[in-house]
Amino acid sequence: PFLENVVAHPIFRSGQATTTLIDTTPELFRFKPRRDRATKLLNFIGDVVVNGNPHAKGYKPAAPLAAVPAPTYDHSEEPPAGTRQKLLELGPAKFAEWTRKQKRLLITDTTFRDAHQSLMATRVRSFDMLACAGALARQAPELFSLEMWGGATFDTAMRFLNEDPWERLRQLRAKAPNICFQMLFRGANAVGYTNYPEHVVAGFVRHAAASGMDIFRIFDSLNYLPNLRVAMEAVQDTHAICEGTVCYTGDILDPKRDKFDLKYYVRLAKELERMGAHMIAIKDMAGLCRPYAAQKLVKVLRSEVGVPIHFHTHDTSGINASAVMRAADAGVDVVDLALSSMSGSTSQPNLNSVVAALEGTPRDTQLDRATLDRFSDYWENVRPYYAPFDTAPKSGSAEVYLHEMPGGQYTNLKAQAESMGVSHRWPEIARTYAEVNQLFGDIVKVTPSSKVVGDMALFLFSRGIKPVDVVNLDPGATPFPESVIDMLSGGLGWPDGGFPADVSKAVLGAQKHRAAQARYRAAMKKGLKAPKLSKRAREAKFAKGLADTRAGVALHLKHEPSDDELFSHLMYPQVHDAFLKHRKHFGDVSVLPTPAFFYGLQPGEEISVEIEEGKVLIIRLISVGEPDADGRRIVNYELNGMARDAIIVDKS
Ligand code: 3PY
Ligand code: ZN
C-alpha cells in the first residue's frame, strides 16, 4: 500500500519527486486498509442497527448502555513480577514445589473463563476483559493464575462473538504479562467435543504454550486416563504446568455411591502423578463436593500425593464457599474463585468474600480486598451488556444433588427445553437427566459426556420413553442421538467398568454391541501402556502428521494457514470458515464496545473505537433511512466529524 500511495501521489506523478517526498508527505502512510477498516465497521454497525445482531436474541436495551470505565493505572509503570516470572525462572517442577510450600491460600480468578461460561453462556467479549486486564496485572499481582481460555471459550469466541481466540490469548498476555494464564483442556477432545488425532492435540498444546499459556488443566469427561496422556506429555515438553485432573462426581460421604468413593479418587490422583502431572486438580464441575467431603478429600489427597492440589468447584448449591473454606483448612494449595459480581449460582464461589474470610488467619491470601472490590464493581456494571445471555438461576438450589449437571450445562439445557416449549416441565427433565445417568451406569458428567446425557434425556423425554424402559426396546431399532451411539461405542473412552451391557445392546444393536465390548476389553488390556517415546521421537512423529494435515487445510483455505488458522480450523472447520468470511466482510469487530457489537447504535449515540494502538475512530449514528424498492436503507454516520454513510439491505 505504501508504494501504491507513492505512485498515486500528484508530486510523484508530476515527475518531481525526490527522496524527501517520503519525509514531507505524511499522507503517503495513510493506507487504504485503514479506510477499509472504518468502512467495514460502519457496515457491520449498520447491519446490526437495521437487522440486529443474529446472536443477540432480538434483545434491544431501552436506552443506550454507557461505556463502563475500568480501574485506572499508570501506563508507564510495568506490572510487578508475578507467578509467570516465577514459573519461567524456576521451571514447572520447582514452581510446583514453591506452590506447595506457600502458607497463604493461593487463588485462581476464573472471571475471564468459567464464571461467564457458567453464568452467561460464555459470551463475555475480549473487549471487556482487555479493558481491565492491565489494571488487574498491576493491582492484583498476587493472584496465582487467571483462568481465561479453553473450555467453551474457543468455540463461542468464533461462533457467537466473531473473535479470534488466539488473538484474545495474545492480547491479554500483552496486558497481563505477570500472572500465570490458565486454560481448561478437554484431554483428547482439546477444546472441542470429539476426539482429535494425537498430532492435533499435541500441536494445539504446543501452539497454546507458545502463545502465552502457562497452566493446562487437562481432564477427561469419563476420567478415562489414557485420553489424557498425549496432552499431558505435550505440556511436559513446554515451559508450562501440566495439571492432571480428577473430575469429581457422586458423594464420597455416601456409602451407597461407592462407585466414586475416596479410594477411586486417590487411585486416579496417584496415577496422574505417575503420569507426570505437576499439580492435581479436583474438578468439581457441578458443585457436588459438599463441604465435609471437600475437607476429607483434600486432606487424604494431600497426604497421598506429593504435588499441589488445586480445588475447583461451583456454587450451584449455594453452599460451596464453605467447601472452599474446608478445603483451605485441610491444606489445599490453590482454589478457583470468581470476583463477587461474577460469582455465585452456577459460577464459582465469591473470591472477594473468601479473601475477607481468611484475613488475619494462617491462610490469609495477602490479596487486597478493596482493590478486588473495584474490579468486582467494574464487572457489575459490565454485566448488563450481556443481559440476554445472563440466565443462570438467581439463587442456589439443592436440586443440583439430584441432577448433577455441570455449571455450564445447566443454563444450556434449560434454554434447549425452552426452545422445545417444555420449560414448565423442567423438574421432570432434571429427573430424567438423573435417571439417564443411572442408565449409563452412573458416569462422570462433564463436557462432552454431560452433553450426551442431556441429549439422551431430551430424546427420551420428548418421546415419552422412561429411561428404565430403554433396555426393553428392540435392540438397535430406536434412532437414538448420534452422540449416545458414539459414547456407548467407546468414542469418548470408557468409564470404570464400561457401560452396562443391556443398555449398550439396546442402543447399539447386538452386532455393534459385540464390537464395542471387544474394543472395551482391548482398551482395558492396553490401559496406560503406550509406547514410551522420547521427546525427540514424539516431535518427529507429530511433525509428520501435522505437515500432512496442514497441507489438507491449505487446500481447503486456498492459502498456507498460519498456526492460528490451522488449529482453529481443525477444532471447528465450519465455524472457522464462517468466522473468516465474517472477518473478510466486516473486518475485526472485536474492537467495538460490547453494546455496539450486540445492539448497534441509537441515533445520536457516539462511540470511540480504537482500531489499533493510537488510532481512534469516533463514530456517531445520525439517522437510518427508509428502505427503497429493493429494501436498501441508507445509514448516516459521522466518522471523525465527517459525514459517511453505509447502504444496508433490510432483511426483514
Ligand atoms: C468445559 O469443558 O467447558 C467445562 O467447563 C467443563 O466443566
Ligand atoms: Zn467449572
Image (cartoon, rainbow, N blue to C red):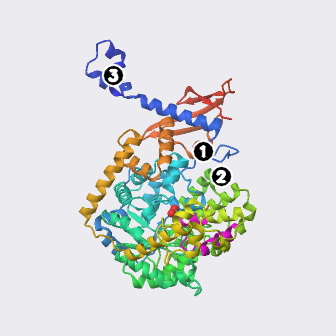
Determine which of the numbered discs, if any, sits on residue 598 in the image.
Answer: 1
Mark 3 residue type: Val
**Above/below status of 525 relative to 487:** below
Question: Do the residues under discs 2 and 3 have CB atoms within 8 angstroms?
Answer: no
Using a 10 Å C-alpha cutoff, classify the residue at mark 3 as few (fewer than 14 neighbours), some (14 to 19) or many (20 or more): some
Q: Position of residue 84 (x, y in %)?
A: 36, 63
Going from N to C along the chain, the mark reached first, 2 or 1, is 2
Residue 439 among magenta residues: yes
Disc 2 vs disc 3: which is toward the camera?
2
Q: Position of residue 304 (x, y in %)?
A: 40, 84
| C-alpha span from label 3 to label 1 | 39 Å
Q: Residue furthest bottom?
A: 255
Q: Is residue 581 left or right of residue 397?
A: left
Q: Secondary structure at mark 3?
A: helix
Going from N to C along the chain, the mark reached first, 2 or 3, is 3
Mark 2 residue type: Pro
Question: To which quarter of the image does residue 539 belong?
Answer: bottom left
Residue 71 among magenta residues: no
Q: Quadrant of the C terminus?
A: top right
Q: Position of residue 330 (x, y in %)?
A: 48, 83
Query: Which residue range is magenta in the image?
Result: 429-454
The residue lying toward the viewer, choosing from 187 and 99, is: 187
Mark 1 residue type: Phe
| C-alpha span from label 2 to label 1 | 10 Å
Question: Do the residues under discs 2 and 1 have CB atoms within 8 angstroms?
Answer: yes
| C-alpha span from label 2 to label 3 | 49 Å
Using a 10 Å C-alpha cutoff, classify the residue at mark 1 as few (fewer than 14 neighbours), some (14 to 19) or many (20 or more): many
Residue for point 51% across, 36% down? 586
Residue where numbered disc 3 is placed: 6
Q: Is residue 365 visible?
A: no
Q: Secondary structure at mark 2?
A: helix
Residue where numbered disc 2 is placed: 388
